[in-house]
């Protein structure tokens, strides 16, 4: 059993409050956050949550830290990063507001977040706004814990990579909350690049993959991740390497091998290889889980492929005419 894997056996012992703040994170993931805070983390290095949302995940982790004999609330700090507002580019929901809807003229739920986390404010540091603006590019403080629930775009993941992954050390714990998201393949192939230096805790906890760094990560590996300078083929190889290490989530509900195969289709899609993307995705339409939960993904990939095919067909007659004209001129 891995160092983190021992926490799986403690799930049944966790009793979370009934009035936890609204969150899009599952109960299983909340319990794991609590267990990490209660039984594993010390707070001697930075504890970072990227994408705190309405506060449910932050609350579960903070509650565990509050009950831990290893965490000193006078010196330890939990850093919570989020836009703390709804709107374009934030991926936040209006359910994060107390009324379930943003007040007229106000799109920030920061005050609600502060109120919900009131018991833990003495050791909570809140960073509200765009991660590129609220994180310090010169901060090299080692990170003990990194919860990544914010990397919905490659732009944001670049910031995560440059300013947080570079601060991981042996013993650091990372949680990728969106690992069941095929549209975020950067999470998958970057993890593939890290495999020689990490130990996966066990089956994903619902959509979250947890791992611990066990060897120093070479700077060149971190650089290629932050610059996203992998070749197309290399990205596919790295995702395949992760497929060899994980299967279904710990409840048996999410087939990660299929999810990661669909992530490969998005590698091709983002690279403009729409024919290849649909060729990868089409066989997966028969997967029960994906057909039920990712129908919009298949529609997006198929539309891109068909659009390319129509454009190619539209160019073909003109191309033939041009060839005939050039042939006539040469004659």
Image (spheres, grey):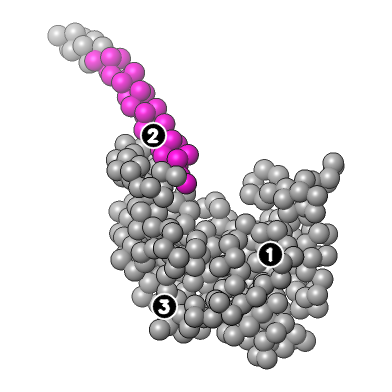
x and y percentages locating residue 112 in the rendered image: 81, 59
Which of the 4 quarters of the picture holds residue 127? bottom right
The mark lying in front, picked from 3 and 1, is: 1
Q: Residue at x 41, y 78 (%)?
A: 199
Q: Name the residue under label 1.
A: 56
Relative to 266, does residue 1 appear above or below in the rendering?
below
Secondary structure beneath dot 1 equals helix
Q: Mark 2 points at which residue?
A: 302
Q: Residue at x 46, y 80 (%)?
A: 5
Q: Tell me the CA gap for discs 3 and 1.
A: 27 Å
- Using the image as rendered, state which of residue 15 and residue 246 is in the foreground: 15
- Position of residue 150 in the picture relative to residue 291 (left or right): right
Q: Tell me the CA gap for discs 2 and 1.
A: 36 Å
Relative to 263, does residue 8 appear above or below in the rendering?
below
Secondary structure beneath dot 3 equals strand
Secondary structure beneath dot 2 equals helix
- Image quadrant where one finds the C terminus: top left
- Give the mark, 3 or 1, whose residue is nearer the N terminus: 1
- Give the mark, 3 or 2, whose residue is nearer the N terminus: 3
Q: Which residue is drawn at 41% across and 31% down?
A: 303
The mark lying in front, picked from 2 and 1, is: 1
- Image quadrant where one finds the N terminus: bottom left
Disc 3 and disc 2 in contact, CB within 8 angstroms: no
Q: Mark 3 points at which residue?
A: 199
- Position of residue 126 in the picture relative to residue 136 (left or right): right
x and y percentages locating residue 197 in the rendered image: 40, 77
Residue 310, magenta (yes or no): yes
Specify the segment rendered in magenta. Answer: 293-320
């Amino acid at each position: 059993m891995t160092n983190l894997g021992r926490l799986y056996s403690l799930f049944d012992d966790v009793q979370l409050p009934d009035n936890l703040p609204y969150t899009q994170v599952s109960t299983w993931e909340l319990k794991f956050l609590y267990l990490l805070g209660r039984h594993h983390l010390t707070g001697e290095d930075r504890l970072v949550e990227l994408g705190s949302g309405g506060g449910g995940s932050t609350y579960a982790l903070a509650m565990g830290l509050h009950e831990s004999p290893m965490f000193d609330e006078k010196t330890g700090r939990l850093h919570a990063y989020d836009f703390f507002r709804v709107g374009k580019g934030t991926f936040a929901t209006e359910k994060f507001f107390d009324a379930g809807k943003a007040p007229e003229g106000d799109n920030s739920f920061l005050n609600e977040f502060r109120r919900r986390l009131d018991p833990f404010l003495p050791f909570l540091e809140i960073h509200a706004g765009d991660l590129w603006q609220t994180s310090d590019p010169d901060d090299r403080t080692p990170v003990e814990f990194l919860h990544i629930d914010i990397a919905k775009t490659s732009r944001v993941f670049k910031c995560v990579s440059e300013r947080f992954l570079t601060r991981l050390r042996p013993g650091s714990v990372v949680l990728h909350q969106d690992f069941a998201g095929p549209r975020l393949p950067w999470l998958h192939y970057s993890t593939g690049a890290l495999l020689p230096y990490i130990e996966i805790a066990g089956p994903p906890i619902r959509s979250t993959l947890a791992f611990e760094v066990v060897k120093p990560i070479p700077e060149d590996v971190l650089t290629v991740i932050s610059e996203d300078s992998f070749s197309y083929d290399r990205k596919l190889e790295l995702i395949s390497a992760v497929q060899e290490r994980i299967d279904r989530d710990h409840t048996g509900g999410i087939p990660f091998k299929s999810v990661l195969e669909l992530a490969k289709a998005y590698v091709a899609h983002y690279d403009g290889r729409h024919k290849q993307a649909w060729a990868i995705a089409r066989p997966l339409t028969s997967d029960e889980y994906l057909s039920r939960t990712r129908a919009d993904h298949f529609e997006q990939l198929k539309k891109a492929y068909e659009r390319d095919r129509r454009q190619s067909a539209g160019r073909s007659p003109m191309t033939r005419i041009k060839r005939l004209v050039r042939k006539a001129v040469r004659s």
